[in-house]
Image (cartoon, coloured by chain):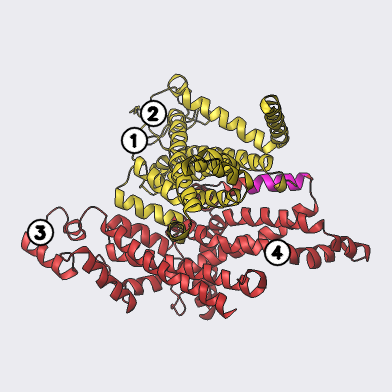
Amino acid sequence: MLRFLLTRVSVIIPTFVAVTFLSFLLIHLVPGDPIETRSGEHGITPERLAELRHLYGFDQPLWRQFLHYEHQVATGDLGTSIVTQDSVWHAFLQLFPATVELSVCAILFAVLVGIPLGVMAAVRRGTAFDYGLMGLSVTGASMPIFWWGLMAILLFSVTLGWTPVSGRISDAMFVEPVTGFMLIDCWYSTDSGACTSTVEHLILPMIVLGTVPLAVVARMTRSAMLEVLNEDYIRTARAKGLSAPRVVVIHALRNALIPVVTVIGLQVGSLLSGAILTETIFAWPGVGHWLVESVQRRDYPVVQGGVLLIATLVMLVNLTVDLTYGLLNPRIRR
Amino acid sequence: MSETAVPVRSRSRIILFWRSFAENRGAALGLSVMALLIMVAMLADAIAPHSPIEQYRDHFLTPPMWQHGGDPAFPLGTDDVGRDLLARLIYGARLSLLIGIAVVTLSLSCGIVLGLTAAFAGGIIDIAIMRLMDIVLVFPSLLLAIVIVAILGPGLFNAMIAVAIVTLPSYTRLTRASALSELARDYVTATRCAGASTLHLMFNTVLPNCLAPLIVQATLGFATAILDAAALGFLGLGAQPPTPEWGTMLAGAMQFYQRAWWVLAFPGLAILLTVLAFNLFGDGLRDALDPKLKR
């Protein structure tokens, strides 16, 4: 087990260095100097330009800038935003809980709705319910979520007025940020109005971001259940006279969940891609929205730091999933 | 000896494949929608009622013809500068199919070359190629595409390159895995002993036997390419206005959709239907080509 752990962890380190190199290089290939971009239409004197370039290190050769960057990353300094002067790490920490909150809720929605639906479809295989659900599932998996989000706003917020259009909480409310997770913070502050507002703001983006995972989970649950329901031990359980729900939920679902959990683990990357679009549509103050804005503003350090942090995060999640499998299934520990 | 046997066998295989494919109603539906889309795209000049970029100054945000205030000259209404929505959707179909073809061709051909090289060369080259693909996979696909477009500059062509790079690892991995399992077979050894060059072995002997999963992946990749290019267009990083690309049309609709639902609804519906058709077709192909996956 220790060897398995060490090999998996040791692969991460060169990948991490390569990722820092790529994120550094990619951003330096962008045409347009950030200082010149910021100076705007009025322009600045060449002396001031040279001075500012020197201040931010843009006059150094590329390899020195990279070594400097690598050193900074190693010491935990991801640079400061050229636009807001805020530290990248600080800004990320402030915005990241919003993205996590949204993504976790979306995945929970997908799992809590998708697994029961998949099980029902498998049990009623070949019925109109099964066909209808599978049709909806392939539609959901094909959904352009940027359109789906706008349509949802148009229907539920604008026409029906059920939910707010954008943001995390009503402008009139304020919740003292303790953890950064709005749901926990407002529960902690025991302000019921703020709680309601938070839930109202969360519900639509959660459904929009959860749509694709929901479709994938429902489909996977159905096919895994169909496979398991054909096994001999299920017949035995039925023959023993156990009730149908007990056979389905206790005997079949437990084994069918293994591939489903794998699929959920694989959704992390696509969930973050979806979060970029969902946050842009709902003006959700998370890292996806922040990164798109930074790319548009050519804020080098923010894009570098943000992309690096997200890639690192995906790597760590993948590693955790990998190690968990090794823990659960001794056969892959080689 | 095999001159008569081979064609008969391959024909019966095609018939078997077609039967199993046609059984799948979803796949048949997907194929029909695809055929319709291709027709629309090819005949765009003949069937579009207007030019996709002509602005009718006295028809801003005209609703669809069945709604109050609609005009039969503009069946699906007009956008904020008076362009006919139906014409833009029709020309958009042409653009979307071109995006799909370009992205899949680029990504698939690079993926095949990289995957075969990794499988045949082995050792350090194999490790280098596959590590590189792992690194690409570490970035969420849309984020990487955004960064690539930011470097190359916004535009349809650069968006297609970005999407092709993002989808490259799946083709590379698939080619390498199938090639490795084929390499262990006797017929490859026999061909090699007969004196075939490595290139011949790669592209003429092994590749044809790896094609089935690649075709499925390419069909599904078509859907991904259209979806991702539209997402980039929506973020303002893909095709630029006035190009009638569906995602770009949605970005333009952002300011008006609360009072003109049609400028939002139709382009998105077009994206959804196209992506859905390719996904259904791809699923059907997979089931027909791989009997193991059948229920």
Q: Is residue A301 left or right of residue B268?
A: left
Mark 2 and mark 3: span between their CA atoms?
42 Å
Judged by depth in the image, the label closer to the viewer, 2 or 4, is 4
**What is the spatial separation of the Cα atoms under label 3 and label 1, in whole angstroms?**
34 Å
B246 within the magenta span: no
How far is disc 1 from disc 2 in space, using C-alphas?
9 Å
Q: Which mark is residue B242?
A: 1
Residue farthest toward the top in the current orientation of the protein: B46
Q: Residue drawn at (15%, 70%), measured in percent from left and top?
A: A55
User: Which residues fall within the magenta stretch?
Assistant: A128-137
Q: Which residue is mark 3?
A: A44
Residue matched to label 2: B52
Task: Reply above or below: A253 against A161.
Answer: below
| Residue at point 35%, 47% (across, down) | B237
Label 3 amino acid? Ile
Q: Amino acid at mark 1?
A: Pro
Q: Which mark is residue A257?
A: 4
Residues at marks 2 and 3 on the same chain: no
Q: Which chain is red?
A: A
At numbered mark 3, what does the secondary structure look like: helix, strand or loop? loop
Element carrying mark 2:
loop
Could you classify mark 2 by the number of other residues whose Cα lies within 10 Å: few (under 14), some (14-19), or many (20 or more)? Answer: many
